[in-house]
Image (cartoon, grey):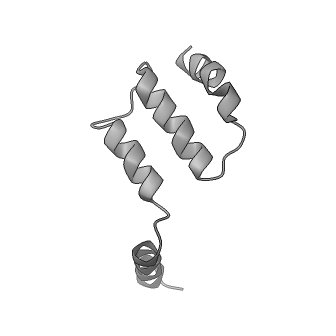
Amino acid sequence: MRLFQLAYACRLYGEFTDFDATYERFLSVTHPSFDVLNASHRKALFKWLNAWGCRQFAVDYHGLASENLKS
């Protein structure tokens, strides 16, 4: 597979799915850049990770994970 073919396939995939909608929300909350000291940015990070299937940050432990990330 050539790089162009991969890029084209990824573009098509993005057009037919909303796989990056949660990432776009993350970017809008953390604009212009992610700030680890900002509690709303950390919350957005964990919500985005959970939406993408990352379960090591269970919703019940977002507060603890957020404080650990900050420190």
Residue at screen point 38% across, 52% down: 24
Q: Is residue 32 above or below residue 53?
A: above
Residue at screen point 44% across, 78% down: 16
Quarter-wise, where is residue 46 in the image? top right
How many marks do you count on the picture? 0
Q: Is residue 39 above or below residue 1?
A: above
Q: Is residue 9 above or below residue 61?
A: below
Residue 49 locus on image (x, y percent): 58, 44
Q: Is residue 4 visible?
A: yes
Locate the N terminus and report the quarter of the image it occupies: bottom right
Residue at screen point 46% across, 75% down: 10
- In the image, 42: left or right of 11? right
Return the residue nearer the eye: 71 or 28.
Answer: 28
Residue 8 locus on image (x, y percent): 41, 82
Q: Is residue 36 visible?
A: no
Residue 56 locus on image (x, y percent): 72, 38
- In the image, 50: left or right of 7? right
